Image (tube, rainbow, N blue to C red):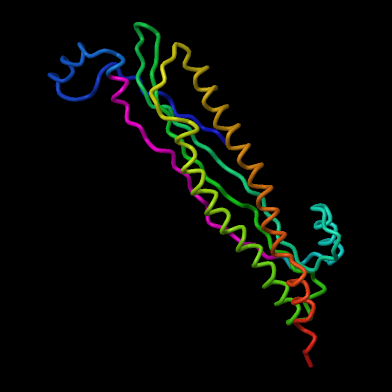
Amino acid sequence: MLAAAALGAAGCDRGSPQGAIRDVFTSFEARCQRVPAVAPEVVAVPLAVDEDHTRSEAELTRLHAGAGSPHRTMGLTLTKLGHDATIDFVGITDPARARTCFRTQVRVELSMRPLTVYVAREAADDPCLSTVIREHEMKHVAVYDAYLQEAAEDLAQALPAELGNDVRYTDDEARARRDVETRVKQYLSDRLRQSGRELELRQRSVDSPEEYARIAAACRAQP
C-alpha cells in the first residue's frame, strides 16, 4: 500500500506579523530549505502465530511439495513477508510561478502474515509426537522473527542513502509524486525478493538431517 498526504501550501512561514513581513523578502528556495528533513521510519510488526491442527499429513505434504520438498510432512510453517509503505510529501507551493518544493517522509511496516504453524491431525492422539513437531516448527518461527527484526534494521539504514531527503523542486506536482512512489515501490519489491531467497536458505538449515533424526527418535522410548 502506498499512501500520500497532500502538500502543505504555505506561501510564507507562520509566526508574528513582523516575521511574515520579513518573509516576503525571503526567496522561495530559502523557504524550501526550511522544510524539515525527517528520517525514514521502518517498523517490524510483531509476529502473530496461528496454529492449525486440522490438516492431514497428505495435505501438508502437498503444501510442502509446492515449496520443492520431497519429504512427508507432519508439520509445516507458512507465512509471507510483506510491506506497507506510507509516503508523505511536505513542502511549499509558489502559485505565482506554478512551482512546488517538497521533501518526502517515508514510513514502512514490514510484516509476516498470516503466519500459521500446522501440525498434522494424525499426531493429535500422540502427545509426544505432536509436541516434538510443534517444537520443531517453532524453530522455523524463531528464524522468521529474527529475520524480520534484522530486515527492518537493515532497511532503516539503507533507505536514507537510496531515497535521499534533499529538497525536490518541480513544476509538475502529480508527476513528482508518481516518480517518488514508483521508486519506493520498486526498491521495496526488489528487497523483498532478495529476502525471500535468504529466508529459504535459513529455513533449510533448520530442516537438517540431524534435526529430522532427532524428531524421528524423540518418541521411540515411550512406554
Q: Is residue 132 depicted above or below 207 in this figure? A: below
Q: Quadrant of the N terminus?
A: top right
* In this rendering, position of residue 52 left or right of residue 68: left
In front here: 58 or 195?
Answer: 195
* Residue 203 percent across, percent down from the top left: 69, 59
**Please, which residue is most extreme toward the top here?**
97
* In this rendering, position of residue 185 left or right of residue 13: right
Q: Is residue 73 depicted above or below 23 in this figure? A: below
Q: Which residues are magenta?
A: 31-51
Q: Is residue 46 depicted above or below 38 in this figure? A: below
Q: Quadrant of the C terminus?
A: bottom right
* Residue 88 percent across, percent down from the top left: 44, 31
In front here: 83 or 33?
Answer: 33
- Kindly identify the residue that appears in the image at 82 percent across and 53 percent down: 68
In front here: 130 or 138?
Answer: 138
Which of the 4 quarters of the picture holds residue 125? bottom right
**Please, which residue is most extreme toward the left here?**
18
* In this rendering, position of residue 78 left or right of residue 13: right
- Kindly identify the residue that appears in the image at 51 percent across and 32 percent down: 3
